[in-house]
Image (cartoon, rainbow, N blue to C red):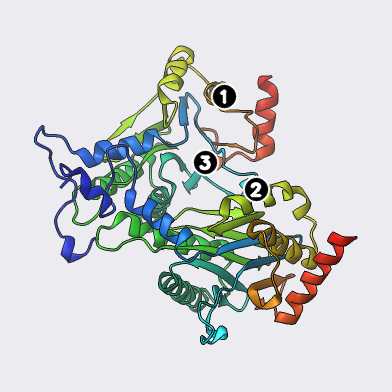
Amino acid sequence: MGDSAYSFSLTTFSRTGKLLQIEYALNAVANGRTSLGICATDGVVIATDKKLTSTLVDTAHVGKVEAVDSGSGMVYSGVGPDYRVLVRKARKSSQSYYRQYREIKPVTQLVKSTASVMQEYTQSGGVRPFGVSLLVAGIDGDGIPKLYQVDPSGAYFGWKATAIGKNYVNAKAFLEKRYQDDIELEDAVHTALLTLREGFEGEMTSENIEVGIVSKADGKFRVLTPSEVQDYLDEAT
Amino acid sequence: MSRDSNYDHHISIFSPQGRLYQMEYAFKAANTSSGLTGVAVRGKDSCVVVTQKKVPDRLMDPSSITSVFAITPKIGCLCTGMSADAKALVQRARYEAADFQYKYGYPIPVAQLARRIADLAQVYTQSASMRPLAAVTLLIGVDDEKGPQVFKVDCAGHYLPFFGTASGNKEQEATNFLEKRVEAMRDYTADETARCAIMCLGSVLGSDFRGSEIEVAMVEGDGGKFHSLTEEQIENHLNAIADDADA
């Protein structure tokens, strides 16, 4: 990647030992719309604020939560176009794994390879880091639900529950209060919606948020339809 | 490199606040350099793009001036901004569409083409060696499963499906006009779709125009082809709009 004319890294160490481009990329993430995830005993839920700038947008066909393969999915905060690149690479890597091993790529492996790609873009010539943090959800090879966050630097962390983007400080505080180690998926979805609503500007409807779940029961990741989201919202009120 | 904070104005690296200045400058160039405004509207089973046709010199051959391009027989676009960048983008879009047809044996769906153009635009925002293209694309077509579709693809690689949208100089005013009609748009016939777009352009430009001063292109119905309206057809729409206004 990158032209030979730019075969030097654009992300270089500052005098104080920081990689400023990565820090700036994290600022780009913090400017993005809030996303969050909660890991339950029997599944994982990820959700995001999909609020779009105009009523003219056909929101039904905009997808922020994307399935990578049948067992994992992800959501982001930050620069949308950069996210699409990572989704595509993740999907390809997942198919490549399946071709070789005839098994769905476990979410932990998927996170490792995606994080590795993001790290490359902080070191390779002529490119800038990705301006997104990802929340990746899946059931691992041993049947344990996992939620990971991947940052622009390529660092990744496993979380019980977390939030990224604009309102992440308040959202995380909210989650910390409500999270319990034995939380189940149904409650996790409700908690996720409550957390999203906390920082939401205006009215939260099934059209301006998106929710994805993977449950241990069938091991499949899927994005909830607007009517399913509406059912959860109705239960909450 | 990152110590010199001015460098972030020259190539696609992050500013301290996490912004990409080169991308923002590309937007400015795309919206203001041509001085044109483009409008796209999606109706019940057709979609339309409209823009002004500005011929800068009377000696120029008007047939060579256009912002409207067919990508495939059934998908077309309005590409505004710096005209050379727009043409480069259109050429690449045509190649991608043809390559898709060759590889998979069926015509590329509008959404896929929009995504591809957007992904290509994204690469320029991440590579230092190529600047982003200063062009915004309004892509229209009728998908055989999803019906009429309008996509806007911008310099940053964002792409979204719209019921109606605008680009260029008077983008904000045009969008305001369309937002008021967004519910009605879903049931518009082909004629109503065209007239809505033309009226939108007329209202934001604040002047009447003749058939030769605007370009209108449409895709009508499932199986319809992307085609530009003739001057006569445009005049018919303009007359109908004037009659409705008087009535």
Instruction: List the residue tagged with mark 1.
Output: A197
- Disc 1, SS: helix
Q: Which residue is at a point 47% across and 73% down the rendered structure image?
A: B90
Disc 3 versus disc 1: nearer the observer = 1
- Disc 2, SS: helix
- Disc 3, SS: strand
Label 2 in the same subunit as label 1: no
Say left or right for A64 vs B178: left
Q: Residues within 10 Å of mark 1 (few under 14, many from 20)?
A: some
Residue A62, position in %: x, y?
57, 48
The residue marked by circle 3 belongs to what chain? Answer: A
Q: How crowded is mark 3: few (under 14 residues within 10 Å), some or many (20 or more)?
A: many
**Count of numbered badges drawn on the protein:** 3
Q: Which residue is at a point 21% across and 57% down the rendered structure image?
A: A126
Closer-to-camera residue (A76/B94) = B94
Q: Which amino acid does label 2 sit on?
A: Asn
Q: How crowded is mark 2: few (under 14 residues within 10 Å), some or many (20 or more)?
A: some
In this rendering, the answer to whether B92 lies above or below B153 is below
Instruction: List the residue tagged with mark 3.
Output: A221
Instruction: List the residue tagged with mark 2.
Output: B176
3D distance between C-alphas at marks 2 and 3 = 38 Å
Residue B188, position in %: x, y?
79, 59
Judged from this view, the residue extending furthest toward the left is A15
Residue A145, position in %: x, y?
44, 31
Q: Which amino acid does label 3 sit on?
A: Phe
